[in-house]
Amino acid sequence: MSRAIGKIVAGYGNMLTATFDTSVRQNEVAYVVTGESRLKCEVIRVKDEFCFMQAFEDTRGVKVGDKVEFTQDLLVAELGPGLLGQIYDGLQNPLPKLAAQCGLFLKKGVYLESLDRDTKWDYTPVAKAGDVVQAGDVLGTVPEGIFTHRVFVPFNFIGKAKVKKTADPGSYTVAEVIAHLEDEAGKVHELNMIQEWPIKIALKQYRQRLLPVEPLVTGCRIIDTFYPVAKGGTACIPGPFGSGKTVLQQIISRYADVDVIIVAACGERAGEVVETLKEFPHLLDPLTGKTLMERTIIICNTSSMPVAAREASIYTAVTLGEYYRQMGLDVLILADSTSRWAQALREMSGRLEEIPGEEAFPAYLQSRIADFYERAGLVQLEDNTNGSVSIIGTVSPAGGNFEEPVTQGTLAVVGAFLGLTWARSNARRFPAIDPLISWSKYPNQMKEFLDKIDPAWVAKVKEAQKFVYNGSEIKKRMDVVGEEGTSIGDFIIHLKAEFLDSVFLQQNAFDPVDAANNMERQVYVFNKVIQLLRKDINAKDKDDARAIFFKLTALFKNWNSSEWQKDNFKNYEQQINEFLDK
Amino acid sequence: MREIITKIREITGNIATLDATGVGLGELAVIESPGKKTLGQVIRISGGKVALQVFGGTKGLSTNDKVRFLGHPMQVKFGPSMLGRIFSGGGVPIDGGPEPVEEEIAIGGPSFNPANRIIPKHMIRTNIPMIDVFNSLVVSQKLPIFSIPGEPYNQLLARVGMQAEADIIILGGMGLKFDDFTFFRRTFEESGVMNRVIMFIHLASDPVVECLLVPDMALAVAERFAESGKRVLVLLTDMTNFADSLKEISISMEQIPSNRGYPGDLYSQLASRYEKAVDMEGLGDITILAVTTMPGDDVTHPVPDNTGYITEGQFYLHNGAIDPFGSLSRLKQNVVSKVTRKDHNDIMNTMIRLYSDCRESRNKIAMGFKLSKWDETLIAYGSDFEKELMDLNVNIPIEPALDLCWDILSRHFQPVQTGLKDHLIEEFWPKDKAMKKAA
């Protein structure tokens, strides 16, 4: 099939309309040749002899009659060794290289290779000459940081093929040929370590999908204990501006116990990414002892970068995630923020003059959100190992109102909801996840696993959640009738709820120890907290009760910031035990 | 010489449509009516038709006016002779001076490469304690001033302009009342800073399209100055007028509105301007302070709401003072007690916490509860805090302001009541209260 050629007939904002001579595909990539630059576009609608394209660049200067070169290819991600540690824009252009080439500012129409072509990799072949292979089979491996990167037969390879020749073990660049395959028709394919995959299509190269049953430990107690996320699961963090979404995402990106983290900064401030960019190369991962950057990929399409590329950026992120999942790794994708992605959809929908849904979002918003989150999952690969992609997406609801379409559309498809509120962030309760509105569907699903930690775990957590709920009800009553009108029994429940909140649900992000807890510590501390919640407190009066809890809170806070099983940890624990035994 | 078209087919709102070929998106055109010249920008091309957004407004435009395309998008002059000058939203001098002879640069340029950004860690001193001490302004920060229409936001902006450490101040006025414009002009002239100020002013009576150009012009000029090593402070007032102009244009382009009539790309439009704030490593920098008036004091209104998601914090103006509670500088932790004095962080938090307690005590009065001794102490502290620090007329550098904080605390509290760390009390708590008082 020949590639079509066309001409621009109309343009408005970043939407361009073109004619074409032979045929076009929906979501095909095309380049508009205008002046000296070639602008990347994607076909998003075809109607009669016209196709409508969204441009990934500023369209200033585009004229009627400009030439359009269609490529026949969908928008793809380049996959291969060397993705880890990279910083890409939404279309997978490496930003540091772009900076080296174009200077301080981005330049339109400049597209660079995503994978470095000069780096040499230590290749070890796995498949042998004569083997029969198919898409997704492993041809060989290279070490990439702490992982063994598998080099696959391209996922879009059709049919079976015979390995004719493989490269000897040694060092190769990604572009050098490492295998010759002969397909069923007798045609010989020369393969290197690079392959491409269309970003908007889920990669389904696995034996079966499994139910996520193992927790993804984020280090954040209110999440891991109260509203956990599973490895291969999804969660949504909505919150108004200033409620600490990004800080929470940053903490998770540092401490989550997964192999690979992909941060998709989608339409947010560039300044927020900078901290990750500049600090991760120097921060050590407590689990591996390597720098955090070695397990991180950053997709950075910030708010002032072209909006269509923003739409592509979260698909790029999830595609890279699926690729590393194929190596039997656990991948976490942090998308900040999916509202900006939804707004990109809305902008294009408006330019296409589609009939709008609620708040002018397109009617297909909900199904697009579902498509995206459904790409998360725990899968069993062909070699019987498991890999997972988990997605935690933030939502920035207009005016902090969770009733809006993006939040609601997301809540319909995710497994956990971690709602941030101004009430909590204004009260400086970090993380500002509101325990009264949040939920997670995973505890029941993960029960078997959690029971191994502690047979009564799920029940205990429920018991604690009940305290939070009762405490807030009592607080509401107390606001009306005052402390005088509240019974001492109720007052103590209120104090217990406050205690639970301040020593367990809240965490001090600036304290090196308290910032993140592993599961072992969370379970240990939580059991002490529960013991205390269950204990009858004998107080003379309310002031006495308050004094007791002041002291307990201070004790636990000090305990929280003491290093695990060190002297002062044991010392504080001793004091807590003395109180419990009284 | 480009073709001159003499047939305008359609005029709606601020948009004129005509037949033309070979015209690019964003290209500039001159429309000549008898006795009047105005610029227009191509915003839509379709077949042989071109839609022009007419900067001067379409009032009096005739279907047989002459239209000439210039072959380039909107530009603005850039150079040292711009300093001290005042331009309209269309880039024309309005101070009676001559057209500056300078190079022309494109506006609305590409985004700064995020990989080139650095973690900002220079504070900008403004000598306003509510900013310096409690919500420090940091180089390359973008901060809005959220305010209801009656507050003295322009006075605050002008004061920051006069006092902030910056080489160049660029003021972008959008929908500015003539009185406010005169106020800015007079203030800058009288305080002797005018020789490092450039003003782009769109008055409330000017055509609405010119309003859209103001931030782009101001920021394009700022960007070039920053590249040449200057520290630039951009003051914008009022971004709500900018957003309203966007709304007006997009509705007349028959775009589907998203929220309260604002276009669906309001966030991207605002972000592409605010994100121009930058600290260029080894070169200059741009810091943006922008007034955003909140219709009906409603922070969930689309303009302040979208702004809040873009900017790095916000200042709230309430009752003529910067409210210490809602206001937030997200970047202050980069400088507080790191480049400033070591007591800064603790004293800042302690002062705010006690002031917040003071508000609770005042609520007790309002609700008719009996006041304790502690409440009375807090209330006395609160009124000193408001008088000596919150008042917008207070004008002191940060170090004396920090000393003043200690002084106010020592007037009302025992050291232990403040919860401040012992080593700070030891070093900073005023030793001889009586003498301080006398002084």
Image (tube, coloured by chain):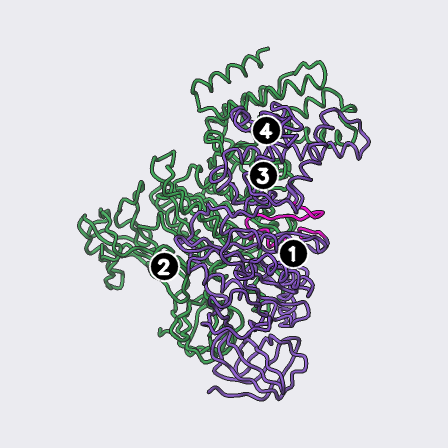
Q: Are marks 3 and 4 in contact (CB under 8 Å)?
A: no
Tell me the mark number nearer the camera, choosing from 1 and 2: 1
- Residue B274 at x, y = what percent? 54, 57
Q: Do the residues at pointers 3 and 2 share their chain?
A: no
The amino acid type found where label 3 is placed reads: Ala
Q: Is residue B106 above or below residue A451?
A: below
Name the residue located 54 percent from the left edge and 49 percent from the top edge: B312
Q: Circle 1 — which element?
A: helix
- Residue A355 at x, y = what percent? 62, 66
Tell me the mark number nearer the camera, choosing from 4 and 2: 2
- Residue A294 at x, y = what percent? 35, 43
The chain containing the residue under callout 3 comes to B
Q: Is residue B365 left or right of residue A167?
A: right
Q: Is residue B125 above or below residue B364?
A: below
Residue with the mark numbered 3: B401
Q: Circle 4 — which element?
A: helix
Tell me the mark number nearer the camera, choosing from 4 and 1: 1
Residue with the mark numbered 4: A502
Give the purple chain's letter: B
